[in-house]
Image: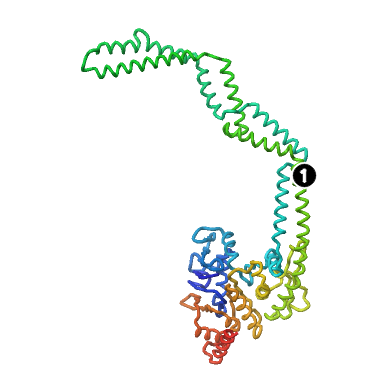
Amino acid sequence: MLLELRVKDLGVIDELSLTLGDGMWAVTGETGAGKTLIVEAVNLLLGGRADPRLVRPTASEAVIEGRFALGPDGQNEIVLRRVVPASGRTRAYIDGGLATTGELAAAGAELVEVHGQHAHHRLARAGAQRAALDDFGGIDTEELRRLRTEERSLLESLDALGGDDRGRARELDLLRFQIAEIEGAALDDPDEEERLIREEEVLADAVAHREAAGSALAAIRDDEGALARLAEAIGQLRDRTPFNEVVSRLRGLLDELDDAASDLRSQGEAIEPDPDRLAAVGSRRQVLRDLRRKYGVDLVAVIAELEELRERALELESWETRAGALEADLRAVRAAEEIEADRVGRLRREAASPLAAAVSARLGALGLPNARFEVEVGGRDGAEVVYQFSANRGAPPQELQRVASGGELARCMLALRLALREDGSSRRTGVGPASTQIFDEVDAGIGGAAATAVGRALAGLAETGGQVLVVTHLAQVAAWANGHVSVTKLHAEDQTVSSARVLGTADRVVELARMLSGSPDSERARAHAAELLAEARGS
């Protein structure tokens, strides 16, 4: 439900702010005052095409903002905002965050339905027309959707098994080669490559390593080496009390150096030049590099890839068994889908005539006595639903969207909504209209009893707990509204400015009198206006 609408610098609107509630709301005003701009503002919030020429000449951009209540209890809210610059790309916002126009349209689609010339007709789309027919007929299509989803899943599973016999054979040959290549490498240690790198570094410089160890050992243990010199230093300080602590530390160093020399000797002697082993290590490392290049960034990934290859090979090797089971399931699902599609199609064709009759009957009361409304249903499952319309006797019905004027289209949508509401369809299936319905031009070309009928119908539609906004020039329609917005045009200096305000009861009488006679001061017109309001309230 639209709670608040703010418009700035759009056409003749300088700045406008409206706070609305539920029920029926009439938007009235003199021709050219800017009533239709309010509808255009809502269309822009719904992602409609923006025309930079709509920006007020004295402004750099137009800004439209709408605050909506969400859900049946209205506890949550959403704010949509659209900025239309005089030049450049438009900007869209949802709850203060940047959004695309498509995202804005998607958010608004479930909030508002606009009926009128060049408006967003949700029910004019084929899918929505089909949904409305299902609504009216109480047709449950959940099982058909489930079966078709299952059919797609089975087809995808069959495709994943592999295509033709030759294709499967080629894939299986490749898989077996890859598996043999990895298995032949006998990968049982994910850290093998790091260990080989260290071993190769030792073997590659074995001679130099041994020579370095020998030289270092000589420097430590020769007669003039580090051990002898350190022992001599300790001897010089022996029994010299002031140096007892230092001597103790030197003796520790002597023992540690002797241990290090022993380790150095053992390690040096362990290093043996081994060209064969060096070549073997290099060859093994090349094997591992090739595997990583083909199958993974490291040996852990290569081992994981081996498991996946084995699983895929097993799938292909057992293809006939699995494919047979899948194909049997597919045949069963398709048989069930055909039966269900026939059932849904039959129900849709059965519901088409009653829906058409219900809408046609209501169109007669809405000022279209010669109108014909038909529902064409095609396809085995009845999915091809097209609403057809003719306003004049003798004229063949054609596609609604192509032949209906803005006013006729709005009244068709009103009649359809009334048919769904009175049939209880929306309550039965949970697929109802958007919480806000806006009708523009719904009263075009009518008056008298037909206008009263339209007003009564709009008020009845609003009684379902939603919100109905109607842009009207007829007092007989506006009188049925729970709330009334008056749009007026003022001339200041060289500018024309429109403003809007919500009217109280006394002001409504004055506005309805103006609409009836052109003169808000006419006592007769005021009396008639008060009578219209009383009639609407007493109904």
Q: Is any part of residue 99 visible from this angle?
A: yes
Q: Is any part of residue 496 visible from this angle?
A: no
* Quadrant (top left/top right/bottom left/bottom right) for the C terminus: bottom right
205 left or right, relative to 460:
left
User: Would you place residue 153 above or below residue 245 in this image?
Assistant: below
Percent of width and height locating residue 26: 56, 78
Q: Which residue is mark 1?
A: 324
Residue at the (51%, 21%) spot, across then down: 201
Give whichever of 518, 389 is nearer the camera: 389
User: Would you place residue 37 above or below residue 237 in this image?
Assistant: below
User: Would you place residue 296 above or below residue 254 in this image?
Assistant: below
Question: Exactly how many numbered labels are in the figure?
Answer: 1
Label 1 is placed on what type of residue?
Answer: Gly
Residue at the (74%, 43%) spot, across then down: 322
Residue ranking furthest to the bottom: 524
Q: Quadrant of residue 308?
A: top right
Residue at the (58%, 67%) spot, across then down: 111
Task: Give the crowd class for mark 1: few <14, some 14-19, many >=20 residues within 10 Å.
Answer: few
**SS for dot 1:** helix
Q: Quadrant of residue 245?
A: top left
* Quadrant (top left/top right/bottom left/bottom right) for the N terminus: bottom right
79 left or right, relative to 372:
left
Percent of width and height locating residue 440: 61, 74
Percent of width and height locating residue 328: 77, 48
Percent of width and height locating residue 410: 65, 74
User: Would you place residue 458 above or below residue 128 in this image?
Assistant: below
Give whichever of 12, 28 is nearer the camera: 28
